[in-house]
Image (tube, rainbow, N blue to C red):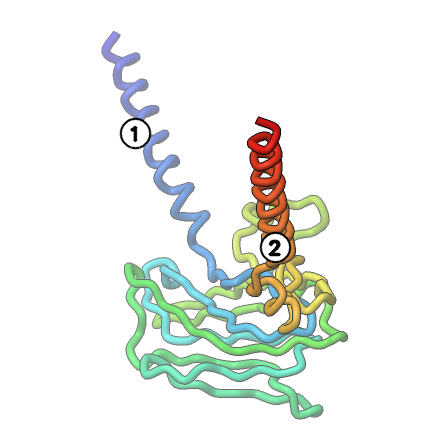
Amino acid sequence: MRSITTKLAVGLVTGAVIAVAAPLAASAHVSVSPDELVAGDHGVLTFSFSHGCETSPTTSLRITMPEGLASVAPTMDGDWTVDVERGSDGLVSAVTYTAVTPVPIDLRGAVSMSVGLDDKTPDTLVFPVLQTCVEGSTDWSQLAKKGEDPHSLEAPAPVVTVAAATGDGGHDGMTMPDAGEKETASAPDLTGTLIGAGGLVAGVAALVVAVLAYRRRA
């Protein structure tokens, strides 16, 4: 009986450890926000993390730029120094953010950059990130294959989806009214009111005539 109780206790402890470790492992990623942009638009991407390389503080993030970006402008931040690499075409190919002070594993770190898209931007933008720590490093560059769950990867790369532009000048399929439409919408339509008032006056007049005619007969 004692042996069975011991095995049950060990099983419960093991299950609890797995239950706690699974969410931690799932959250141990370098993420990007927002994860969707509109083709031909501009946006600010924020790359964040809340862990180091196992138990070691983070010292730098090197983010490789995907092809198809029209422009890249890293954000200056007092907590990071920025080093920009450019390709033969003059476009930014990689950006390295080095922490002024290593980021502890129990604190959230984040860096950002402005990116511009054009008609050559693909539907998916992959940003491989090399996270370097005081001890060790992690290469966040894995990409899920078709039908594979990205959350099952050990070191997935941050991915941004590019949505097609609506082409109507609005956002999220909503068309914004022009100035003429705004004036028309703001100015009240008095036609119905005038017609109603005229009908009321005509009715009262008819009633008065009827009353006078009745009195004359009487």
Q: Nearer the viewer, residue 62 or 45?
A: 45
Q: Quadrant of the C terminus?
A: top right
Q: Is 132 situated above or below 55?
A: below
Tell me the residue that label 1 is attached to: 13
Q: Secondary structure at mark 2?
A: helix
Question: Which residue ends up furthest to the right in the rendered image?
Answer: 120
Q: Position of residue 101 (x, y in %)?
A: 29, 78
Amino acid tagged 1:
Val
Q: Quadrant of residue 88?
A: bottom right
Q: Secondary structure at mark 1?
A: helix
Q: Is 61 situated above or below 82?
A: above
Q: Position of residue 172 (x, y in %)?
A: 63, 58
Query: Which residue appears at 62% of the width and 83% of the height?
Result: 71
Query: Which residue appears at 62% of the width and 34% of the height?
Result: 213
Q: Nearer the viewer, residue 1 or 125?
A: 125
Tag shown at residue 163:
none
Query: Which residue appears at 53% of the width and 84% of the height?
Result: 73
Amino acid tagged 2:
Leu
Query: Which residue appears at 47% of the width and 69% of the height?
Result: 46
Question: Which residue ends up furthest to the left in the rendered image?
Answer: 2
In the rendered view, does 134 fall on the left or right side of 25? left
Near mark 1 (Cα within 10 A), the count class, few <14, some 14-19 or many ≥20, is: few
Q: Position of residue 163 (x, y in %)?
A: 68, 61
Confirm or deny contact between disc 1 and disc 2 (CB under 8 A): no
Near mark 2 (Cα within 10 A), the count class, few <14, some 14-19 or many ≥20, is: few
Q: Quadrant of the N terminus?
A: top left
Which is nearer the N-term, disc 1 or disc 2?
Answer: 1
Tell me the residue that label 2 is attached to: 194
In whole angstroms, how far apart are the C-alphas of marks 1 and 2? Answer: 81 Å
Q: Is 13 situated above or below 46?
A: above
Q: Position of residue 79 (x, y in %)?
A: 32, 79
